[in-house]
Amino acid sequence: MLRIFCACSIFLLGGCIGSSGFLEFYEMPNGWNKNETVTFSFTAPDYPSKNNVFLYLHTDHKYPFSNLFVITDFVHPDRQVQTDTLQFEMTSPDGSSLGTGWMDVKEHKLWCYENISLDPKKKYTFRVRQAMRMSHDPQSIENLKGILDIGLGIEPVE
């Protein structure tokens, strides 16, 4: 039932992006392992505008943290790599999810890059890996539970 809901959500979201953007999801059936890098490859949309880049996460009640640290690599057509460590708030101070949705699955739409120019019709790669740690342990968390899907969205700035 939960997977059907996620599939329907992905389908509906894909319809919202339309032909002028990009949206792709990668399923995480067993959580997000510390050694797993999720890679998205896409061709930049052919329109003369700035773009916003979003990371989408579908989570359930098993996600145990109020935030999320990720390391991203944005590989440009000239092979230049922009690497960033990003932190996202996943819950409000009272512990309620900042994601949208009903029942157990919440969708988080997280800003990665704002107002960036992409070279039309050129190929880009976006890689993301989790960088979560316990405060008393410098080692990565072996398997981050509660992450169901990870998506990348590219939207034109309106």
Image (tube, rainbow, N blue to C red):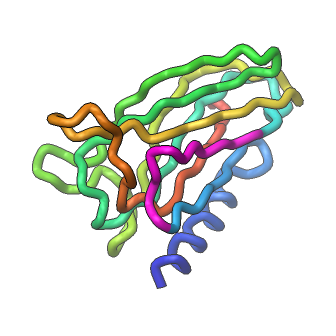
Residue bounds of the magenta highlight: 30-41
Quadrant in the rendering for residue 155 = top right
Q: Per the image, is 35 magenta?
A: yes
Q: Quadrant of residue 128?
A: top right
x and y, in percent, of residue 24 in the image: 67, 52
Q: Residue at x 35, y 54 (%)?
A: 99
Going by the picture, which residue comes out furthest to the left? Answer: 94
- Vertical order, 22 against 47 (above or below): below
Residue 39 position within the rendered picture, expressed as x and y whole percent measured from the top left: 66, 42
Q: Nearer the viewer, residue 35 or 89?
A: 35
The residue under the point 29% across, 50% down is: 98
Q: Residue at x 19, y 46 (%)?
A: 92
Pick the residue in front: 90 or 143: 143
Q: Is residue 110 above or below residue 150?
A: above
Residue at 76% over, 30% down: 124
Position of 64 with respect to 48 (left or right) is: left
Q: Residue furthest right?
A: 121
Residue 94: give x, y in percent of width and height: 11, 50
User: Is residue 23 positioned above or below 12 on the image?
Assistant: above
* Total numbered circles: 0
Query: Where's the C terminus, which quadrant?
Result: top right
Looking at the image, the residue that sits furthest to the bottom is 1
Left or right of 107, for residue 114: right
Give x and y (percent) for residue 75: 70, 24
